[in-house]
């Protein structure tokens, strides 16, 4: 009898799960566990929206495992202590998991491995990205700081052979496993991932977490929206994006699985237009890859600007302005609509994310980290690498950053991407051009003030 502890984290799926595959191949009995240890994730404990998603994703995974005779068991507390206790009770011989790449969590996992390797065999796998961070370097063996050359380096590596090799269905292998129950296991509800106040009920009308729904969304996207993705993805009023970002973050689907599904389209199975759009979509997956590489090489960028000239004193402080921005009460319709969409759905269209981020950091001059923290708590797809790099990109202080003189004009953006106010009217039903509240600041003069601030504090 060989017993393995299978430690789930952000790989809440059955298929294309290397750790689960290893357990199938090397164990007769398995203990699937999830350990809730938010204090180990400081200063980036999951936000409220992420906890809601996590609760429901775990519930979905629990049901899928139960269908195959396995019981997902929940624990809370210090991860090393919990695992050590499970080893002692079950006589497990192996601990297997898929790696996390957030620097503070990677450090924790290495510590756990060092402490437990005398008791069990520790086996870990790369997961959630095309390639492990740190393995794609430039010709000088240094990390990329600009996306385009990173994309050019990684794109030839993504081949039909890579896609075919990536996904192995292991459902049949689960049938041969038996589960082992541990007396100290808890219930999902006891983890208290859901807030006491049921504000999150509204999210159920917009999202259904879980591996199965991730593939339903991908199928729907491939049936229609992907054909026009290259142009439609910038129009916030239409369903032109995949909305797979939270599923990717929680590991309910992987980039490799997606690439396998879209590969026939990339090869022209449908038509040239669809092939072009599928390539643009693949490029967005590589952008996500780039963000994780940046954080892996430069872990300080989760809280510090890549460009050190953007120190704390560069930014102005205004609690009133910040609160107005979070509430969608700026008097700028597309900004307010975006913030209302975020509050109601836990998600915001990417084009609008750029607009509201530019407004906060450039027109209002408020530190990008304050915006990143708000997104962290309110987004269901809050991802440390993507969130940090995205905010620094807009603010102008990160890798491959937008130049300081690029200030998104909300009115111009509205004319280009929400011509008939369909997006604005959806999230601001009270919107009326004639009597909508005046903007909290003048867009033209605040832009000039931002440019002046950048020129004197950054360019000098």
Image: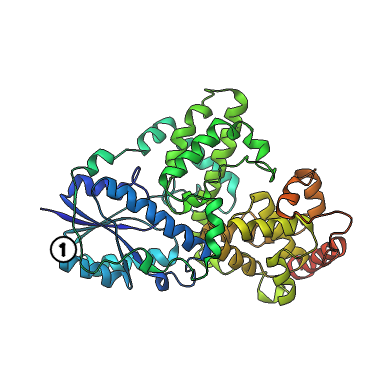
Write the residue at 70% across / 54% down. 427
Where does the image place residue 426, in percent across and percent down from the top left?
A: 71, 50
Q: For residue 40, what is the image quadrant?
A: bottom left
Nearest to the observer: residue 304 or residue 212: 212
Left or right: residue 50 versus residue 162 is right
Left or right: residue 73 versus residue 154 is left
Disc 1 target residue: 90
Label 1 Cα crowd, 10 Å radius (few <14 / some 14-19 / many 20+): some
Nearest to the observer: residue 439 or residue 135: 439
Where does the image place residue 332, in percent across and percent down from the top left?
A: 79, 59
Tell me the element at label 1.
helix
Relative to 279, say whether 86 is above or below: below
Relative to 371, say whether 160 is above or below: above
Q: Can I make out residue 305 in this image?
A: no
Nearest to the observer: residue 271 or residue 217: 217
Q: Quadrant of the C terminus?
A: bottom right
Write the residue at 23% across / 48% down. 69
């Amino acid at each position: 009898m060989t017993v393995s502890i299978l430690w789930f984290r952000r790989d809440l799926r059955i298929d294309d799960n290397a750790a689960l595959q290893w357990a199938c191949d090397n164990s007769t009995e398995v203990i699937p566990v999830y350990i809730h240890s938010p204090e180990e994730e400081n200063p980036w404990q999951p936000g409220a929206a992420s906890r809601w998603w996590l609760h429901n994703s775990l519930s979905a995974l629990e049901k899928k495992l139960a269908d195959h005779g396995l019981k997902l068991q929940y624990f809370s507390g210090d991860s090393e202590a919990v695992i050590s206790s499970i080893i002692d009770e079950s006589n497990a011989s192996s601990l297997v998991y898929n790696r996390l790449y957030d620097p503070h969590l990677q450090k924790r996992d290495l510590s756990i491995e060092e402490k437990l390797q005398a008791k069990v065999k520790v086996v870990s796998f790369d997961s959630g990205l095309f390639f492990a961070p740190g393995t794609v370097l430039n010709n000088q063996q240094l990390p990329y700081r600009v996306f385009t050359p990173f994309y050019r380096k990684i794109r030839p590596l993504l081949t039909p052979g890579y896609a075919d090799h990536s996904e192995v269905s292991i459902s049949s292998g689960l049938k041969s496993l038996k589960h082992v129950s541990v007396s100290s296991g808890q219930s999902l509800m006891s983890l208290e991932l859901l807030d006491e106040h049921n504000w999150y009920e509204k999210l159920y009308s917009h999202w259904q977490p879980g591996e199965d729904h991730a593939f339903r969304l991908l199928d729907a996207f491939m049936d229609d929206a992907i054909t026009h993705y290259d142009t439609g993805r910038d129009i916030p009023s239409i369903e032109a994006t995949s909305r797979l970002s939270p599923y990717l973050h929680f590991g309910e689907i992987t980039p490799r699985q997606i690439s396998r599904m879209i590969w026939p389209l990339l090869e022209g199975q449908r038509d040239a237009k669809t092939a072009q759009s599928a390539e643009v979509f693949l490029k967005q997956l590589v952008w996500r890859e780039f963000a994780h590489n940046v954080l892996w090489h430069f872990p300080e960028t989760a809280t510090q600007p890549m460009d050190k000239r953007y120190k704390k004193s560069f930014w102005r402080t205004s609690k009133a302005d910040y609160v107005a921005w979070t509430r969608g009460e700026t008097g700028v319709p597309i900004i307010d609509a975006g913030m209302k969409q975020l509050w109601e759905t836990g998600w915001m269209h990417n084009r609008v994310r750029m607009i509201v981020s530019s407004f906060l950091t450039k027109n209002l001059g408020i530190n990008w980290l304050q915006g990143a923290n708000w997104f962290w708590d309110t987004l269901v797809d809050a991802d440390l690498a993507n969130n940090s790099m995205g905010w620094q990109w807009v603010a102008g202080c990160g890798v491959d950053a937008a130049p300081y003189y690029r200030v998104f004009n909300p009115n111009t953006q509205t004319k280009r991407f929400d011509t008939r106010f369909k997006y604005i009217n959806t999230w601001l039903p009270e919107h009326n051009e004639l009597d909508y509240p005046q903007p909290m600041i003048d867009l033209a003069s605040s832009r000039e003030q931002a440019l002046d601030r950048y020129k004197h504090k950054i360019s000098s």
